[in-house]
Image (cartoon, rainbow, N blue to C red):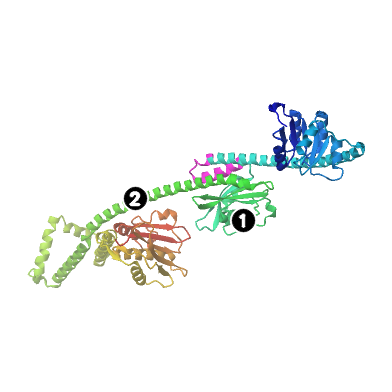
Amino acid sequence: MTTSNPKTLPKILYIEDTADSRLLVQRLLARDYILLEASNAIDGINLALDTNPDLILLDINLPDLSGREIATRLKTSLPNTPMVALTADVTSGAREKALVAGCVGFMTKPIDIDIFKDEIKAYLDGKREYLEKPNSHLRAYHEELVEHLEKKVHELTKLTDHNNFLNKQNKLVIADMQRHQRLLEAAASVGHNITSILNLDELLQTTVDIICKEYEFYYAGIFLLDNSKEWAILQAGYGEAGNKMAEKKHKLPLDGNSMVSTSIRHRKGEISANVGDEEKHFKNPYLPKTRSEMALPLIAKNKTLGALTVQSEHINAFSNTDISALQAMADQLAVAITNAHLLMDLENANQELLRTKTFEAIATATGEAIHWVGNKAAPIPGSAVRVQEDLLNFFAIFKTLLDLPEEERDSHPFSKVANEAFRLLPSLDIDLSQTAGALKKLPPDNLPLIVDIESTLEDLGIVKQSAETILNIKEDLIGPGRISKAEIFDLPVLFSATIAGMGLPKEVITSSYPVDVPQAYADKRQIGRVLINLIKNAWEALGESDQAKIHVSAQPADEQGFVRIDVSDNGPGIPPEILEKIWVSFFTTKGSHGGTGLGLSACMEIITQSGGKIWAESKEGEGARFVILLPVKK
């Protein structure tokens, strides 16, 4: 069949879900007909209604609606369009049910290509197949329709239930997403409010207050690790309960089973959906309404600072999505805490620098003053000795003259010396006669008290001893710097010699150092004096206790070009108010038990003159540590 005008070609619609079958029919009919295709029942029905084809070929076994059901549907809308079943279904009754459903013909697969085109033309030309007794087959077809309809109703019911389930799940997902969005917005608000706070105490308390208000949580608390990394200590908590726990220094062991400890150790968020079922949850009497808890680690620059705990009065108040939302806020908090620590360290460094410079200025001024005093005191011991010698000489002369007969006195050589001395007295503005007159007025019994040679000599001895003490102090302050002679020496050798010379019990004082400890470059004798002074101070602070321990160690310093020496003890420590004063000259805590208050001042001067540094670290009840940095071998 051929024609020159495609618009006049008959239209054939083929509804078939198998692509291979559609391709075969396409090849057989495309030259002589306009071939329309549909791969499913619904598209086929719509295409048939839209195009009004001249012939419809139907596959019977389609997924949703069968070919028979399509024929029944289109028979009413397209009564003049012939429909032919093209199927592989050759079971008994298949042809009859197709014809009673509305088909005018029944063709089987596989297609016989030799007669297929002729059969198609026949149906287009009016060929029709009829049943002798259609009613008997119509009932079977109606039963099939009812059964198929019932099946579809069941499928639709299940689909409706599934859709309802999906709708509920979608609502939960949407609600969870909305809650997650609110958490993110609240986290941003918390981060915005805390990043500008640089005071640590204010930062922590403000953070827990904002968290509870923004998130509507029952409680929030911030734990920070102590220096030993063994305890997580509560630094700030929300409300009255938080204040009470902070005042009592509430803390949790890092190796414990609490959620805070677990979160810090594992460096990830922890959730307890129902704290009543969690044995590891700490039953806190201050927070009796807690039903669920979440703990988030505080990590900044890969360093774990502590943890944030948030608690709710409701069971299952937190989810894994909350961890991701709130961890961003916890990370911002960790950064803010780090910044506050850095500012605090900077302020402490500035204060320490100011104190150091003050102490250096005081030590310098004191050194200059004592240098001047020492120079003035230098002649005193010699003068006192000469006065004592002159006084004894005068006594010897007068005793000799008094023992001589009167007629021999004037001719004795001592008489000339005595007369010469008395002759000079008026020129020195000394009136012996006036002094003698005053003595005559005294009762005879008082004269021995006024003229006491023993007391006079004792006073001269005090003058001499005091002057020598001043000169010794001058030597402690000025001498070390003046006679410094730098050299390269081994610290272990100096440690051994110093400790041996101290004479302390072996179980009290110990030393340690690595085999490759650098050699120091300083005045070895002066550094030995510093070690003796520090060890002596430690021994006196320990009070010769049975548990006394003093340790001297050396190691490479963090500062390049220096070696570090530590002298530590397990004594009572140095109170903070005294720690700032110990370097000031003449300051001492020993009272009348000895000490001039110049030992540590001299130590500072020696170390400073050596190009090093010295400082003290101590907490009351935890002993004291003196740290020295000395230049190493060039």
User: From this viewpoint, which residue is outermost toward the left?
Assistant: 411
Residue 82 image point, x, y percent: 81, 32
Q: Are marks 1 and 2 in contact (CB under 8 Å)?
A: no
| Residue tagged 2 | 357
Magenta stretch secondary structure, dominant: helix
Which one is nearer the viewer's eye here, 213 or 164? 164
Q: Is residue 212 magenta?
A: yes
Residue ID at (77%, 32%): 55
Is residue 598 shown to the viewer in this render? no
In this image, 162 relative to 219: left or right?
A: right
Left or right position of 557 against 170:
left
Amino acid carrying mark 2 in the image: Lys
Which of the 4 image quarters holds residue 151?
top right
Q: x and y percent of residue 354 in the render?
A: 37, 48
Q: Write the start and end of the magenta stretch as one range.
A: 192-214
> Could you classify mark 1 by the number of other residues whose Cα lies within 10 Å: few (under 14), some (14-19), or many (20 or more)?
some
What SS does tag 1 mark?
Answer: loop
> Mark 2 Cα within 10 Å, few/some/many (few <14, many 20+)?
few
Q: Position of residue 431 (x, y in %)?
A: 16, 57
The CA span between labels 1 and 2 is 47 Å
Residue 562 or residue 140, whichever sits in front: 140
